[in-house]
Amino acid sequence: MAERRDVMHAATAAIPIAELPLTIAGEPMVLLSERALYWPARRRLMIADLHLGKGDTFRAAGIAVPSGGTLQDLTRLEALIAATGAAALWVLGDLQHAPNAPQRWRAAWDAWRTRHPALELVALRGNHDRGLDPTAFGITLAGEHVVDGPFLLCHDPDAARSPAHAGLHALGGHLHPVVRLPGVRGRLPALWLRADRSVLPAFSAFTGGWMVQPAAGERVAVCAAGAVQLLPRRA
């Protein structure tokens, strides 16, 4: 067990994390290159679309995908908590991928949770979280949305908005936004900043992506390994 902790510590230390200060809905925030948003006023790390166990779900269906994805994602979370000193982690929907899938990944999750007993862990319910047992995960399940400061924290910012939430900035995930940059191979995860809502990139490395087409006045911030960049605003 001590050897495994040493391996985790070494892997965590090897993850470079870049920071980009932003202001969203009047609140100072920090976008981190490992696809997370930090809210300094709350000492809160926020991610979306963790999709724990997605690889197990695919393998159970006979689809050959590499193993170890959950451990890699948890190692990245470990590095983010160490870098920010976060007191809380909020998952804005889709903590798990499928409730009835084989749960070989649970040992990695349970060990990770044990290493962070003082960390407040809150999840909002996403479309993949049906049947999610908060007690088994050691988390607080806060429902489908939470109003906190100027934000409507939710999973799907488009679906969660209603007249009752007028004036609030919706903050969530669900879409897995990605962009392409000239001269860069592949698609890169991105934070999509809109006038009244912002969409976080999917935290899990094993997800698809939805190509963002920002409208005039909207911004996109790209997250890559060890780098984060705010792209120019469209005219």
Image (cartoon, rainbow, N blue to C red):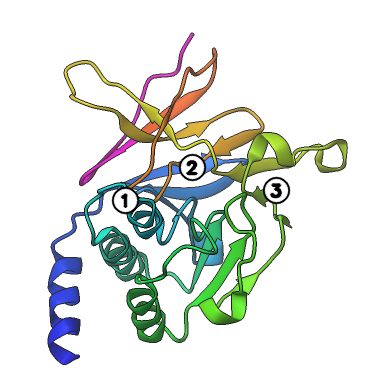
Whichever of labels 3 and 1 marks the residue nearer the N terminus, that label is 1
Circle 1 crowding by C-alpha within 10 Å: few under 14, some 14–19, many from 20: many
Q: Residue 104 carries which label?
A: none
Residue 218: where, in percent of width, then height?
Answer: 53, 22
Q: Mark number for residue 152? A: 3
Residue 88, how many percent across, how many down? Answer: 51, 71
Quadrant hosting residue 57: bottom left
Nearest to the observer: residue 41 or residue 98 = 98
Look at 54% across and 43% down and name the residue there: 173
Contact flag, marks 3 and 1 (Cβ < 8 Å): no
In 3D space, how far apart are the residues under numbered discs 3 and 1 (Cα atoms)?
23 Å
The amino acid beneath tag 2 is: Leu
70 and 142: which one is in front? Answer: 70
Q: Are marks 2 and 3 in contact (CB under 8 Å)?
A: no
Residue 112, above or below 83: below
Q: Compare marks 2 and 3 and give the one earlier in the sequence.
A: 3
- Which quarter shows the N terminus? bottom left
Residue matched to label 2: 200
The spot of residue 197 in percent (x, y) is 63, 35
Residue ID for mark 1? 34
Q: What residue type is labelled 3?
A: Leu
Type of residue at label 1?
A: Glu
| Label 2 to label 3: alpha-carbon separation | 13 Å
Q: How crowded is mark 3: few (under 14 residues within 10 Å), some or many (20 or more)?
A: many
Badge 2, how many Cα within 10 Å: few under 14, some, many 20+? Answer: many
Mark with earlier residue (1, 2): 1
Q: What stretch is highlighted in magenta?
A: 222-235
Report the side of 50 relative to 206 (left or right). Answer: right
Q: Give 101 or 142, whichever is nearer the viewer.
A: 101
Residue at 50% x, 60% y: name it.
Answer: 96
Q: How many numbered marks are there?
A: 3
Q: Can you say whether 59 is above or below 103 in the image?
A: above
